[in-house]
Image (tube, rainbow, N blue to C red):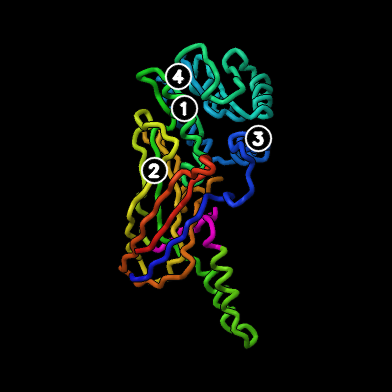
Amino acid sequence: MSTKRQREAEAPEAQEELPADFDEAYFEAYDNPEIHALMLGDTQRLGSYLAAIRCHRGAMEGKLVLDVGAGSAVLSMLCVLHGKAGHVFAVEASPGMASVARRLVEINAMQQKVTIIEGRVEEVELPGKVDIIISEWMGFYLVHESMLESVLAARDRWLKPQGLLLPSSGRIWAALVEAEELRKDLAAYEDLLGLDLRPVSSLELQRYASQPRVENLEPRRLLAEPVLFAELPDLRTLPPSGSRQFQAKLSFRSWRRGFAAAVAFWFDVGFGHDVVLKTDPGSPPTHWKQTVVYLGAFAEVEAGEVLAAEVTMAQSEENPRQYNISLETL
């Protein structure tokens, strides 16, 4: 295709006015119980972690575990209950949630097995090295919120040389998608009660393209086979970074005729023993959903036609908790 468009877009919610201390605002947000209720209600998320803990029980039994960003400490308690961990250090930087976690540990009579430590994992002190680090660090499109860097900092400081990371790998996927309902809604402006209102349609389409959107995609919206955009094959050896960036040229071969409207991103993470947490449109829905970057136009493609795009995800200099996503069709 000869069509060429480029959109620079920050991560979801990046357009909001943010305090100077982004980390403080980030941790304050996780004091909101609604966020934790959303995550605890994500059965795909919890089920994958439970499966991983059970599969690694042999490595976890009687051992020391560090839970990074423990939140409600549910993973910490699952490590004790199902993994038979010797002791879990649950580090949580949000004061309100750390208090809730202590109460939950008490209610479940695990005070002798789980220690809640309030503070940032980069700053807290532990009695010594741990055998396993477990963390639910993933954000939208895997790396939003940049909590991965905290896990890597904890790894370098506290994980024993042959220690285990859960999850241990991650991948970001991309797919070409259509938006037929949106396209038809906007087409109505071409002749609305005898009036040509196409500029309104253009404004609405640009609004969609102004920043990534988080949506639950139906599999039928995919126009082409998903392709691998980026891979973190081994978190035990991944170097930490304050300016992480992923870049790739992607080629999407259309399954059928349609109108390409966006590129969608999602992720999966691996725990070993064939345990994988998936967030693709064909898997059971999760609270991460999929991140959709609209092109700002509807590109007509035929079956078998290839649409190429260059995609960059780069950690924002203004707010390192977020990423800038650049997408250019070639």
Pointer 1: what residue? Answer: 53
Of 88 and 194, nearer the camera is 194
Residue 187 falls left or right of residue 301? right
Q: Pointer 4: residues within 10 angstroms few (<14), some, or many (20+)?
A: many
Mark 3 lies on residue: 28
Q: Quadrant of the C terminus?
A: bottom left
In this view of the protein, can residue 282 be seen by the observer?
no
Q: Amino acid at mark 1?
A: Ile
Q: Nearer the viewer, mark 1 or mark 4?
A: 4
Residue type at mark 4 is: Trp
Quadrant housing residue 238: top left
For residue 173, above or below residue 301: above
Q: Give the alpha-carbon distance from disc 1 to disc 4, as whole Å.
A: 20 Å
**Neighbours of disc 2 within 10 Å: few (<14), some (14-19), many (20+):** some
Which residue is the site of mark 2? 171
Sequence-wise, the earlier of marks 2 and 1 is: 1
The answer, for residue 271, to whether it is visible in the render is yes
For marks 2 and 3, give the one nearer the viewer.
Answer: 3
Q: Residue at x 43, y 46 (%)?
A: 314
Q: Which residue is mark 4?
A: 158
Across and down, in percent, residue 37 comes to: 65, 38
- Residue type marked 3: Glu
Residue 126 point in image, percent of width and height: 52, 15
Circle 2 SS class: strand
